[in-house]
Amino acid sequence: MRIVLKIGGSLLAEGVEETELASDIERIASEHSLVIVHGGGRDVTHVCERMGKKPIFVTSPEGFRSRYTDLETLEIYVMVMAGKVNKELVAYLRSRGLNAIGLSGVDGGILKAERKKKLIIIDERGRKRVIEGGYTGRIVSVDTRILEYLLNLGYIPVIAPIALGTEGEMLNVDGDRAAAYIAGAMKADRLILTTDVDAVYVKGKPISKLSLDEAKAALKDIGPGMITKIYASIEALAMGVGRVHICSGKGDSPLLKALEGLTGTVLER
């Protein structure tokens, strides 16, 4: 099988070495083709604060909460995501004997995105406002050639969610949706989105399985922390991914159990 795995930033901030993710990744990579996309927003926030740059987060009318990325924030984002977070994760995986190689979406033109010129947000009074888009992007294409080449050589690509803009600039793109687009372009059999909760909750209840239509209908009842993962899942399934698993990255064999449908939430067409 072809599997794309997104490791959430909250898990990275707490320390992947404190989880069983590496053991599961080793098992999966020994039997399947594996591509990893990682988050790292908490690390970006910590470095911003240490550098005296106040992080700003905005919420869209659809409920997406995202980092507002001006030019200074972009520079910190690239430094932390493609540098510190990516290389720490690659170093850890390689210390476990895994043949990981670190990349960003800019390398080899893996991710191309269109810069958002304007953003519609909900302000502190609950009103809609239009602001400058900054340096965030909407993914428009994925070039999988370098990923295919590396997989054929036995590598595990580890990708930071930074895209190349249509005007040659670097852009911040959402990690879950980057993973979804990569999975779709590679016609992956499985997409795994890890988080720090055990499943998708709808109206306070954990859901073990959602169809594509059920996922769309449930969007209004899902909190801002999960809504991006549901959108990413819907996009991945629409692009031909066989099945999406949203699961915790903690506990005993979290990825293997999720693939077997024993934990987390499974979304399928």
Image (cartoon, rainbow, N blue to C red):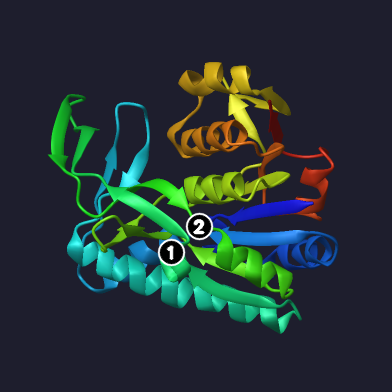
> Label 1 crowding class (10 Å Cα cut-off): few <14, some 14-19, many 20+?
some
Residue 205, x across and y down, in percent: 64, 23
- Note whether 33 is above or below 137 in the view shown: below
- Residue at disc 2, secondary structure: loop
Residue at image coords 68%, 24%? 210
Residue 157, x across and y down, in percent: 61, 68
- Note whether 222 is above or below 119 in the view shown: above
> Label 2 crowding class (10 Å Cα cut-off): few <14, some 14-19, many 20+?
some
Residue 185, x across and y down, in percent: 57, 48
Badge 2 or badge 1: first in the primary sequence: 1
User: In the shown orientation, is residue 136 left or right of residue 127?
Assistant: right
Residue 147 circle label: none
Camera-nearest residue between 246 and 225: 246
As shown in the figure, which amino acid type bears the numbered disc 2? Asp
Whether residue 15 is visible to the viewer of this picture, yes or no, is: no
As shown in the figure, which amino acid type bears the numbered disc 1? Gly
Which residue, given by chain and number where applicable, does mark 1 sit on?
Answer: 109
